[in-house]
Amino acid sequence: MEEKKLDVKSIIGFVLIFGILLFMMWQNQPSAEEIETQEAEKQAQIEADKKAKANTANTNNTKVTTALDFAKPTDSAQVAALQSKIGDFAFSAATSTFNDDELAVSNKVLDLKFNTKGGHLSEVKLKQFVDFNQVPIYLVKDGNSVFNIQFQTTDNRTLNTKDLYFQPTVTKSGENTIVSMKLKTAQNKFLEYNYVIKPNDYMVDFTIKSQGLETAINTSNPINLDWTQKTYRHDQSISYENRYTRLTYKTDGDVDKLSQMGDDDETEEDVDWLSYRQHFFSTILVSDKPFKEVKITSKNLVEDEAVDSVFTKQFSTKTALALSGAAINNNLKLYYGPTDSQILKKYDNNLEESIPFGWGIFGWINKFLFIPLFSGLSSFLPYGVAIIVMTVIIKLAMSFVQYKQYLSQMKLKVLKPELDAIREKYKDNKMKAQQETMALQNKAGASPLAGCLPALIQMPVFYALFMFFPTAFALRQKKFLWAEDLSSYDVVAELPFNIPLYGDHVSLFPILAAIAIFFYMKLTTGQNQMSAPQQEGMPDMAKMMKYMIYFAPIMMLIFFNQYASGLSLYYFISNLISIGILLVIKNYILDEEKIHANIQVQKAKPKKESKFQKRMKDMMEQAEKQKQMQQKNKRK
């Protein structure tokens, strides 16, 4: 009975103690204001923990998953292991029926293959073109191109799309083929590459977007696009092709480019498009909205032509993708096709500006004169004949310049006896002799500069054509006489050894052009040497021109041996026509006696001295006075 009473008392005691504890807890509960303060402190602590984890990830404590970390799972154990490595993105690999498979799609001009691993193009073949060995042109093949998006997950993993498995679907929309590659975390949550292939188009519409990945991808960190491509060699001469293989880009309305031969890198802003140009073929990435900041790199892969014979350059682009809220939504385009101005101008954004027509006025001459002219001629003439006819038209149009140049030389020739008399009269005062010489030439209208100005007028045309022929896609693999390809060098003999700068073959068109240049310079230089006496303080032009007679043809012979035979053909015909025009002007148009009579009339007319001539005269007189003062000081 006593034990029972004790037990009841104990129970009553425990109940009382519990009641007291409840009363104390009720009394000590926080007020509404205290609760709000605690919640704010808790949220601040959570944010601080997130930042700390992010900082830890950025100091190399984040797990970076690479291709070596995992393969496509084949059983539940491998799925679980994969989930521990790449988290939610293991869903796509686990549910995919593909395993490094390639999905083939074609239109009339392109054969495309997409790899489910990485979701991007693994092969691009241009159906209508072959290289110098008659091998089909591939812009992407055997891993030469990597298109990758790197992002950080909310559980602090750094993943690369090139290592992850996408789920493909192919549908039709009218005549267009649509390829969708989805990297899924769930059935309705994914990162998607969407490609629209039109039936007869080199341009592929390309969209990168995400759906429902706000909880999977950490959008507070940049989502980086990394696109790298090695450019295959397609031309007969890899060094010649490499000279015109160049990363070109449009930024803020201007078109610019990286180094032509050496390694180069730049960071640019507001980039509209990037072109991985391979001389006659290009891979171009176009963005609907400019990339805000882009790191671009070009690396030369040809150090020794005998060894480095597969690739020309390696190009790479790194940029952050733009976000729409917390989602990825980028509308892009991918061009895989010829570097042909006629094709590229059909698209927006001035893509044809990626072709090196020449800067400033030279580019304008090519785009608005030579390209339309050659296109019109080659539409009904064989390409070699079109070059010849185009050369004849240009030379005839510029014949007035050659006439003015030769007329100036004839005037100096007629004045030569009087100029010799002046030099003899003032042989002890060379400054005075020069003043009198300039005065006589001015009165007679026979200034040496009058012969230089026509030559300067021809320079824009000369340089524009120098840029036109190596970039004229229409000349590619077009035959003429012994030349198999007017866009490459012609070969009449193979050499058993390689000569530095010259090559291992003999091209005939450069030889013919060099011979024509030699005879043309021989004709013009002989006239110059008779009519243009050396001026005081000036280089001996007669001696320089004598050397140039031999130097210019040798340079043509050496450096053009590996250039486009179409360009050498142009120079050969151009110089033949120049010789013919010069002989006609000399023998049938200009009369030395009439020129002499006209000069006498000009000399008799009073001629006002220009401000420039007066300034030059004053400068020469001051120089003469200073010289006399120096001589006096030396005598003292």
Image: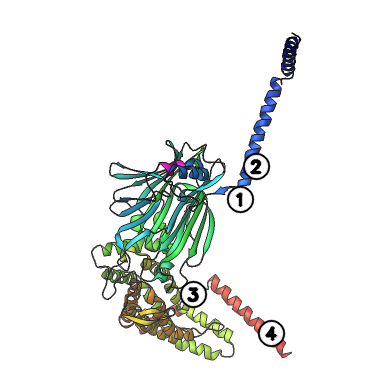
- In the rendered structure, which amino acid carries the disc numbered 4? Gln
Q: Residue 270 location in percent, x, y? A: 51, 50
- Residue range in magenta is 90-103
Residue found at the far front of this picture: 1
Q: Is residue 58 left or right of residue 76?
A: right
- In the rendered structure, which amino acid carries the disc numbered 1? Asn
At 53% from the left edge and 91% from the top edge, which residue is drawn?
A: 424
SS under mark 4: helix
Mark 4 or 3, which is nearer the eye?
Answer: 4
Disc number at residue 60? 1
Mark 4 nearby-residue class (10 Å; few <14, some 14–19, many ≥20): few
- In the rendered structure, which amino acid carries the disc numbered 2? Ala
Query: Is 626 included in the stretch rendered in magenta?
Result: no
Mark 2 nearby-residue class (10 Å; few <14, some 14–19, many ≥20): few
Mark 1 or 4, which is nearer the eye?
Answer: 1
Query: Is 100 included in the stretch rendered in magenta?
Result: yes
SS under mark 2: helix
C-alpha distance separating marks 2 and 4: 80 Å
Q: Which one is earlier in the sequence, the residue at label 2 or at label 4?
A: 2
